[in-house]
Amino acid sequence: MKKTIIGLLVAGAAFAVSAQEKALLETLVKKGMLTQQEAAQIAKDSVSVSPAAKSTKSIKIFGGGQGWYTWSQGSVRQPSAHPSLSQTSGFTLQYVKLGVEADVGAGWSGTIITDFGDGIKGTNYLDTVVASKKIDLDYINGRLDLGLRKVNMGYEQNMCDFGQLAIDRSVATYFFTRADGNDGVLKNFGSRTVGVFWDGNITQVPGMYYSAAMTSSVSEGSENVLTASNSLSFWAALGYKKVAEINGESISYDVGINFGYAPQGSVADNGRTGSIWGINPYASINWRGLTFIGEFFFQQVEQYSAGSDGTCRSPMGANATVAYKMDVGEWGAIEPVARFSFVASNGLGVRSASELASGSDLGLLSYDNAATIFVGVNWYPTSAVKTSIGYEYGYLYDNATQGSATNAGESVRAYSNCVRAQVQVLF
């Protein structure tokens, strides 16, 4: 699979180079620097790649890479034992992406984005694979996607991997939108999955948008995301965004709500499945380089683990992020960032995002609640390069009722400290 994907991307790149070479030869002939015969001979001797469909209008190649250094330390404290300490550190290639986007005419396009980094799991190195159709009729305006992509659940989760304000996504985003984001029940409720997606605009109300999707019940973080599942999940969203003028200054905002229902989205250790439904209201405001993003999560999860036969859990959580981007002349721009995140898992069990990303653990215990604070700074020497450094503190407390804690009657607390630096380059 990996070799096939790389071959397709190399072929696309070769086609793009061939098109540029042809344009260069035509320019040199016009300027009298080459004769038509010399240009024809050069073109004949060159390797050329042609698209399979004659209707193909353009092919765009893009990508980027992001490397992390992470130092993470966690400690567990409980009355019946001495405090325990765990520590990890090391380098990671978090995202390594290469993509091809082709406009094949008549409103149709195709996009393939691969990711060979550590941040993607369960999708065979595929970030996005969609066939798209733009539709613009009297009352219907939008784009239909068929294939693999993210569902609309979680504002931070659906921000570009290369466009995150904090270096990593939050504990709430991990818990509520990824199958591997909690320490108890496997929740297939968000992130990448295979299905049919519609993103539309309400033309009668400028700025109002909506979406709907019907997808597989298996999502990123689980195994076999690309294979057929025995159930479907359903998604819908409604939002409004606008740029307003206040005292001669522009302020942009985006508010909305995401909704999802997965009849078999909850998978217990014993293989039994239950339903999940959830909502995710959000708001984003940008003014004079100042950005604020807030979102709330609420889910109801049907749990069929041992001792919890059909118990309905109702976890909730939130993210609040603020950043201020400042121009510093020839040095580019800097952007201080702060974020607060919390999860009340209602017995499902949670670990910190730093642990999940680094692979460390806090005593293999399952905690009911988590709160984290991140502070850091991004530096943009150019628009294509970003370097960042940040620190995240996490506090996890109360044992989850079905977790792996052996001292379920004790008040167990955990503390995590994580320092992370990153370098990112786009092209």
Image: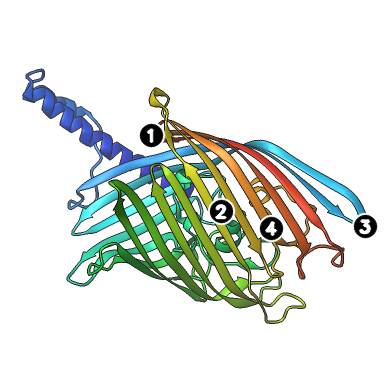
Q: Which residue, given by chain and number where applicable, does mark 1 sit on?
A: 383
Q: Amino acid at mark 4?
A: Ala
Q: Amino acid at mark 3?
A: Ser
Tell me, yes or no, if residue 4 can be seen here.
no
Foreground tag (4 vs 2): 4
Q: Residue at x 77, y 78 (%)?
A: 307
Give SS at disc 4.
strand
Tell me: 423 left or right of 332.
Answer: right
Cα gap from disc 1 to disc 4, whole angstroms: 35 Å
Foreground tag (3 vs 2): 3
Q: Residue at x 10, y 17 (%)?
A: 33
Quadrant that contains the C terminus: top left
Outermost residue toward the front in this view = 247
Outermost residue toward the bottom in this view = 310
4 or 2: tag closer to the N-terminus: 2
Outermost residue toward the top in this view = 33
Nearer the observer, 257 or 188: 257
1 or 4: tag closer to the N-terminus: 4
Cα gap from disc 1 to disc 2, whole angstroms: 28 Å
Q: Is residue 318 above or below residue 86?
A: below
Q: Which residue, given by chain and number where applicable, does mark 3 sit on?
A: 80
Q: Which residue, given by chain and number where applicable, does mark 4 sit on?
A: 370
Give SS at disc 2.
loop
Percent coordinates x, y for residue 241 in the rendering:
34, 59
1 or 2: tag closer to the N-terminus: 2
4 or 3: tag closer to the N-terminus: 3
Disc 3 and disc 2 in contact, CB within 8 angstroms: no
Cα gap from disc 3 to disc 1, whole angstroms: 53 Å
Disc 1 and disc 2 in contact, CB within 8 angstroms: no
